[in-house]
Image: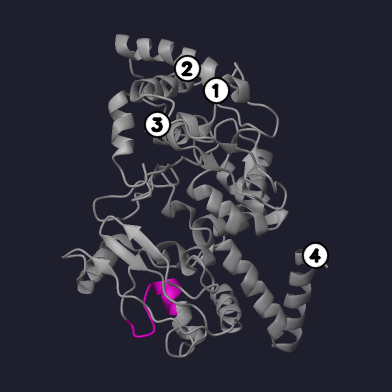
Amino acid sequence: MTLTIRLIAFLALAFATGVVPASDLVERGRYLTLAGDCASCHTTRGGAPFSGGRVIGTPFGAIPAPNLTPDRDTGLGAWSADDFYRAMHNGKGHDDRSLYPVFPFTSYTKVTRADTDAIFAYLKSLPPVKRASIEPILRWPYSMRSLIASWRLLYFDEGEFVHDPKRSAAWNRGAYLVQGLGHCNECHANRNAFGAMVSEPYLAGGIIPVQNWYAPDLSMGPNGGLAGWSEADVVALLKTGRSAKGTAFGPMAEVVLQSTQHLTDDDLAAMATYLRSLPERDPPAQRESAANARDLARTGQKVYVEQCADCHGVDGHGKGDAYPPLDLNASVTEPTGINAIRMVLSGGFAPATRDNPRPYSMPPFSQKLSDDDAAAVVTYIRQAWSNKAASVSPNDVRAYKSTPGG
């Protein structure tokens, strides 16, 4: 029985009897936790699912994710559905303390009460695991929880998603998933000095704090990060981790692995429909190519032919499903150049998904290339073929190496 038929049957029975079958509610909650990618943060390596303990790094310190299993002493066992809705919708815990916004209640506030109830029912169905929470380790003054009240006043807009009657059902579903449960803007946005998302323009891309990956602009319109992508390209990336336009690496690979590959084709198509509606962006500022940048690109072309062309093609179009294209690849042309530098130096792995169980990996070249050569080849691929991104310098490569994990 398809998910659509199950939901129709679920709604019909609920309407007729006023009672929601517990098994259907739990199953719907399980699906919604996948859409929200809840397990990624709330499961530590080697730990029981949803039992917490994974430490989330922020520019202000480290915040461990709490236990979501129904253990009464250390998890959600003493919580009510009202408590859980308040946490999701308002960012307040069982004890009414303000939650740190590393928990994305700034997006989850859009989730409906019916969906938070389903998620809570699923979490309550899990085996209880006793795992005490670890206290956050934050620098002063960020360790003063009372300051969150001011932060909330400035940067938190509470409110469930409002259906737009002028838009299609698919657009509304996609907007609900992208803005709310999927909390895409939590990564795909710049943040100010206080860690708040810069939401205008929406989903315009930004550096992920601490992780130092650039999450690209998600507009599919002119000058957007996904300009030239079709809805089918977006669906393919979210479902398999690869598409004709690029491959998911870094944090996005984990999102595909843990979350989006498990969503229905209808929901993935709805997300693509919504992204296609994002407004076009202003043209990027044009930079004149300095002489040293031109020299870098010429050197980079030689490095590319020797080290990269066998896989990615002399024309930058890649090779089938194995090696992604570099021409018009959003990860290559993003504004900072950090993603291309990371991939050249450190390599990476696409997610092993149900529809792409044995993905090809990108080997690291940090032992083969000098800082000058790495900057040269990144500059070349950012400016070759149809790409028109700014050059990077050897100092940019050295700056990446000096960051944690670089």
Q: Which residue bears the numbered disc 4?
A: 2
Q: Which mark is residue 303?
A: 2
Q: How many marks?
A: 4
What type is the residue that disc 2 sits on? Val
Front disc: 1 or 3: 1
C-alpha distance separating marks 1 and 3? 17 Å
Of the numbered discs 4 and 2, the one sitting upstream in the chain is: 4
C-alpha distance separating marks 2 and 3? 17 Å
What type is the residue that disc 1 sits on? Cys
Taking the magenta stretch, the answer to whether it contains residue 94 is yes
Of the numbered discs 1 and 2, the one sitting upstream in the chain is: 2
Circle 3 — which element?
A: loop
Q: Which mark is residue 308?
A: 1
What type is the residue that disc 4 sits on? Thr
Callout 3 environment at 10 Å: few (<14), some (14 to 19), or many (20+)?
many
Residues at circles 2 and 3 in contact by the CB criterion of under 8 Å? no
> In front: 218, or 62?
62
Circle 4 — which element?
A: loop
Residues at circles 4 and 1 in contact by the CB criterion of under 8 Å? no
Q: Which residue bears the numbered disc 3?
A: 337
Left or right of 347: which side holds 27? right
Residues at circles 4 and 2 in contact by the CB criterion of under 8 Å? no
